[in-house]
Image (cartoon, grey):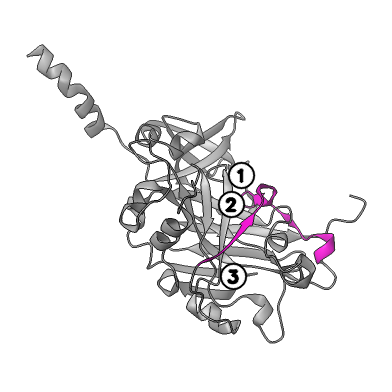
C-alpha cells in the first residue's frame, strides 16, 4: 500500500498545485526581481511603471527565472506558492531572445495604405535596444523629431518556447504550433515613418529600431486563458482619444500560419517574440497626418491581456 501511495504522489501534487494563468515580472519593495501572478495592479503602476504607495500586489510563482517559462519546465515554473508581495516596479513580462515583426498583416490596414494583399508574410526585425517596460517614458529620437514622424502600432505579441518534450520550434506544422507558444502579450511597434521609407534605405528595420521603440507588457497570458486568439479586440488611445479599434480576425496570416512559416528551416529560439502586425488607424495615413509628440500618453490594449501605457518625452539631443 505504501509503495502504491508513493507512486501516486506526483499525480497528487499536480492535481493540488495551482498554476498561474498570467505572469508579470517585477521588482518588489525589497528590491527583489520576481515572477508572479498579478493580484492588483494599480492605475499608477500601469501608467508609470512604478507604485511606491503599496497599491499593487502579486502572488509569487515557484520559479523566478523567466527562461523557465520558455522551456519544458513551464508547468513547474507556473506553480503558485501562496505568498503575496507588493509590486514596486513593473517590467517586461519576459526578456526576449529576439524580436521578429510582421508587416501589412491586417486587411483593413492594407486597404488604408493602398497596398496589395501580400502572398507571403512580410518579415522585419526589431533590435533588442528597442525594449521598454510598461509605463516607461519613451524619448522621441532627435533624428526623427523634425519634422515629427513617430507613429503608434498596437500589436498582438506571441512568445515562443520549447515544447513539453524539449524540442525547439523549427519546421512546425500549423496543427502543432500551440505546443510552442508560451503565451501572449501586448506590444507597441513604434515606427519612424520617414526612416521607414527612403531614409532607412528601403528596409523597415532601421525605422523600428530606435531606443525604446518596443514597449512590451503588461503581462504574459498563457494560451489556455486566451481562448480564440483570432478573435481578440485590440485598440490604441492617444491622450484618451481612440485611434485604432480592430480585431485579430482581420489578420491576413493567422498566428498559426505565421509561426509555421517563420519556423521553416529556422529555429525560433525560446523567448522569441513575434509582433503579428497592426490594424487600421495608424497616424501617418490620417488627413492631416498625426504623429506622436512629447507628453502624449499612448495606451495600446488587447482584449483578455491588458493595457500597456507609455508616455513620449522630449527628443534626445545630439550631444546626449
Image: magenta residue range: 121-144
Name which residue lies at 40% across and 62% down: 257
Q: Report whether 106 appears left or right of 195.
A: left
Which residue corresponds to mark 1? 51
Please name which of the two marks, 3 or 1, marks the residue nearer to the observer: 3
Q: Give the image location of residue 282, x and y in percent.
A: 62, 75
Image quarter (top left, top right, bottom left or bottom right) of the N terminus: top left
In the picture shown, does residue 220 fall above or below 230?
above
Q: Residues within 10 Å of mark 1 (few under 14, many from 20)?
A: many
The residue under label 2 is 99
Label 3: few (<14), some (14–19) or many (≥20) C-alpha neighbours in 10 Å? some
Residue sticking out furthest to the left: 1
Q: Earlier in the sequence, mark 3 or mark 1?
A: 1
Q: Image point 84% across, 63% down: which residue?
A: 143
Say whether disc 2 or disc 3 marks the residue closer to the N-terminus.
2
Disc 1 from disc 2: Cα separation: 28 Å
Of residues 142 and 114, the one drawn nearer to the viewer in this rendering: 114
Circle 3 residue: 237
Residue 17: where, in percent of width, then height? 28, 32
Q: Evaluate if marks 1 and 2 touch, with contact meaning CB atoms under 8 Å apart.
A: no
* Residue 164, quarter of the rendered image: top left
Amino acid at each position: 500500500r505504501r509503495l502504491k501511495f508513493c507512486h501516486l504522489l506526483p499525480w497528487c501534487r499536480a492535481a493540488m498545485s495551482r498554476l498561474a494563468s498570467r505572469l508579470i515580472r517585477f521588482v518588489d519593495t525589497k528590491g527583489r526581481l520576481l515572477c508572479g501572478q498579478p493580484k492588483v495592479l494599480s492605475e499608477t503602476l500601469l501608467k508609470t511603471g512604478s507604485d511606491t504607495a503599496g497599491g499593487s500586489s502579486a502572488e509569487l510563482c515557484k520559479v523566478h527565472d523567466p527562461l523557465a517559462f520558455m522551456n519544458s519546465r513551464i508547468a513547474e515554473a507556473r506553480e503558485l506558492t501562496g505568498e503575496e508581495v507588493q509590486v514596486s516596479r513593473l517590467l517586461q513580462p519576459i526578456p526576449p531572445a529576439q524580436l521578429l515583426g510582421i508587416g501589412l498583416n491586417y486587411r483593413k490596414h492594407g486597404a488604408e495604405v493602398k497596398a496589395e494583399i501580400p502572398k507571403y508574410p512580410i518579415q522585419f526585425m526589431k533590435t533588442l535596444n528597442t525594449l521598454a517596460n510598461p509605463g516607461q517614458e519613451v524619448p522621441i529620437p532627435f533624428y526623427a523629431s523634425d519634422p515629427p514622424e513617430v507613429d503608434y502600432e498596437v500589436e498582438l505579441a506571441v512568445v515562443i518556447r520549447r515544447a513539453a518534450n524539449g524540442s525547439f520550434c523549427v519546421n512546425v506544422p500549423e496543427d502543432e504550433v500551440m505546443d510552442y507558444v508560451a503565451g501572449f502579450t501586448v506590444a507597441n511597434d513604434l515606427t519612424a515613418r520617414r526612416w521607414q521609407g527612403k531614409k532607412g534605405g528601403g528596409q523597415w528595420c532601421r525605422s523600428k529600431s530606435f531606443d525604446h521603440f518596443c514597449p512590451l507588457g503588461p503581462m504574459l497570458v498563457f494560451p489556455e486563458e486566451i481562448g480564440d486568439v483570432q478573435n481578440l479586440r485590440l485598440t490604441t488611445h492617444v491622450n484618451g482619444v481612440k485611434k485604432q479599434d480592430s480585431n485579430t480576425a482581420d489578420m491576413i496570416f493567422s498566428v498559426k500560419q505565421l509561426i509555421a512559416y517563420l519556423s521553416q528551416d529556422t529555429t525560433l529560439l525560446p523567448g522569441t517574440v513575434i509582433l503579428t502586425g497592426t490594424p487600421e488607424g495608424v497616424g501617418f495615413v490620417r488627413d492631416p497626418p498625426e504623429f506622436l509628440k512629447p507628453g502624449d500618453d499612448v495606451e495600446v490594449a488587447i482584449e483578455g491581456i491588458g493595457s500597456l501605457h507609455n508616455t513620449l518625452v522630449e527628443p534626445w539631443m545630439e550631444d546626449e
